[in-house]
Amino acid sequence: MLQGASPRSPTMSWLPIAPNFRDDLRAALDQAKPSDALERLAALAAHRLGFLETVQLDRALARLDLKEAPGFQPVRLAILASSTVDHLPPAIRVAGLRRRLLIEVHGGAYGQYRQDLLDPASALRRFKPQAVLFSLSAREAIAGISLAATAAEVDSAIGRFIGGLRSLWRRAREIGGAAVIQQTFMDVSETLFGGYDRMVPGAPGSVVARLNDRLIEAAAEDGALVLDVARASQRDGIDAWFDVGRWLQGKLEIAPQAAPFYGDLAARILAALRGLSKKCLVLDLDNTLWGGVIGDDGLDGIVLGEGSAAGEAHLALQHYAKLLKERGVILAVCSKNDAKVAEAVFRDHPEMVLRRSDIAAFLANWDDKAQNLKTIAARLNIGVDSLVFVDDNPVERARVRQSLPMVAVPELPEDAAHYVRCLAEAGYFEAVAFTSEDRERAQQYAANAEREALLGSAESMDEFLRGLNMSVVCGPFTSVDHARVVQLINKTNQFNTTTRRYASEEVAHITSLPEALTLQFRLVDRVGDNGLVSTMILRPTPEDEDVLEIENWVMSCRVFGRELEYEAMNIAVEAARERGARALVANYIPTAKNDVIKTLYPNLGFTEVNQSAPANGATRWLINLADYVERDTHIVVQEQQDD
Amino acid sequence: MTDQEILSKFTRILRDLLLDDSIELAMETRREDVPNWDSFNYINFIVAVEIEFGVKFKVADIESFANVGAIVKETTKMLA
């Protein structure tokens, strides 16, 4: 970087600017109740914060000294680093607050990460992290590789390094099934040969590129997640992410001005692990999906498609939305328009990429958009906080943010050419897996529409359910379905009895325990395969091994009202009896979202066990298997084939 | 920008950074005169000043600034 030039900062352009940050921060700290102060800080964290604002906000958060708070999920994250990372935890905590996560960060001394992992008495192990982030510099990986090394020599050196890394990942996982997050290697090397660099296997730039390729392969095999600073630094330019002065002064590999963005990258992975990624993209129409106003300009007048730069820009957003749909994001429309006029564009405009059938909920009317967003969430059976609302109109955006602060509303740039970039950069849909369920989700939503039509034509609920010809395929968790099981457990918020979240490794561990009983349910009907839609984890209680506790039970909202909960319990009781159990116990832990199952256990014949009222409002339920009355349902049971 | 103007901006930056509105900087203030202004927060301060003023200090200068006044002078020089 040129001397005298200011450092470039990666900016979170999708977040609105805080108009009055200093005063708002101080006002937050003046709140009498820490929980009120926390809400105000979380609201501030949802703005575009620079380096200094991030540090301040974190300092304010530290003053509150809250380890937990209602409406916020606590997370314990350890960072293991080979460079100085003291500047990263504040940014990670602030980005966590943006997602209503209270992240406690444990950072070891830099370069100490191997000892910390291996020493059974280390502070790291006592901290019991739920996620471990490896923030390593490429320097140590490439140190032993000479410039003259052959491709084979480079490969074997990298193989050894990655092998060492994988054993560290294993160690990290052994600490209570922590999720592993590995930062990609930033290429801070300078060119030696110019354009010829990449043709020399031992040239630093070549080695780092190779290292990252191998890292991604290993991460995919081992189920580690990736925090991709290599890609971020390529996008923003290495000067935005690496400042050689800071490296020389304090061995900081991530430049301080990049810390807020880094924190957001880390927090989105932690949020995704907890099922907090967004699920649905809600699109405005006029001047968002196309240029112009369909009601005024008509089908011939709107700007869309090839032949006009602006028309292609809007088309690019449609293409991007279509890709999001293919990866499992639900699409919806929320527009101030006449419904018939708006739908006609989807049907009749030759340049439209999105078709009406791509849109799971289509609300074009003259009502308040916040109200329409609530309707969309209700219709799709997802939380309002699972929505991202894309609208070119700053007034609409501000109104939605004000009345529904839990909806993500990106601050779209004025130029439609940059809409896609803004939406993509925001990372709303951060994934920790891409499962077959994701690929088929759009189809499943379409199938559900068909089922709703069947329901409409049926004389009674009973006739509807009978007409569906449902069968459930069930059995223990399998390795084939592992990723989907983990995803379902962690993304389900409504039918979730305990809202306990499980890392991938933890699920694998439980599956391997002989005393644990795991059940997965796939519901098939005449319209189609609903996929794997429910899971249950049961374990013997510590007090009495003949009593099995339903530690967690989730069911996808797609199959509510289909009697699956009754058939699942029939199956669970049968499996428990086979093991010689005499009773089942279960907790129901209420959250803001699982009200729909508050009478689940009494409906299934469980009776409440008296206990002193716990702080989380949990109730405990018991049924003696001898008393269980099997429920008649319209679902036929099939055992799954072993994998 | 006068030295006083720069100094008052520096004061605001350090108050924000340490979340301490009682901080008053003078040209002769040294780091050890300000509670909690440790080496980590010294780098943070430099970063914040660089962003705010759009300047970039030399590595050698950063490790040899004797007091706040020296940083003010260097900033003035770069803004010129």
Image (cartoon, helix red, strand yellow):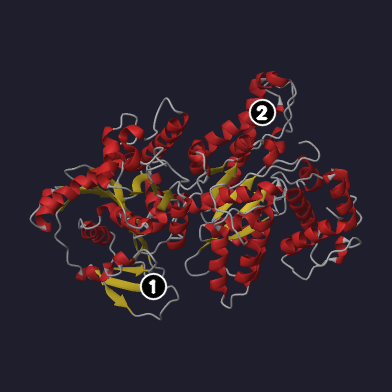
Which residue type does callout 2 highlight? Val
Question: Where residue A543 appears, x then y in whole percent?
Answer: 40, 72
Tell me if A108 is positioned left or right of A611 in this view. right
Q: SS class of the residue under badge 2?
A: helix
Q: Which residue is label 1 attached to?
A: A618
**Foreground pick, A587 / A267:** A267
Name which residue lies at 60% across and 39% down.
Answer: A232
Q: Which residue is label 2 attached to?
A: A207
The C terminus of chain A - image quarter: top left
The N terminus of chain A - image quarter: top right
Sooner in the amino-acid sequence: mark 2 or mark 1: 2
Q: SS class of the residue under badge 1?
A: loop
Q: Chain of mark 1?
A: A
Name which residue lies at 35% across and 48% down.
Answer: A335
Tell me if B71 is positioned left or right of A236 in this view. right
Tell me if A535 is positioned left or right of B67 in this view. left
Question: Where residue A395 appears, x then y in whole percent?
Answer: 46, 54
Question: Where residue A370 appears, x then y in whole percent?
Answer: 38, 58
Which residue type does callout 1 highlight? Ala
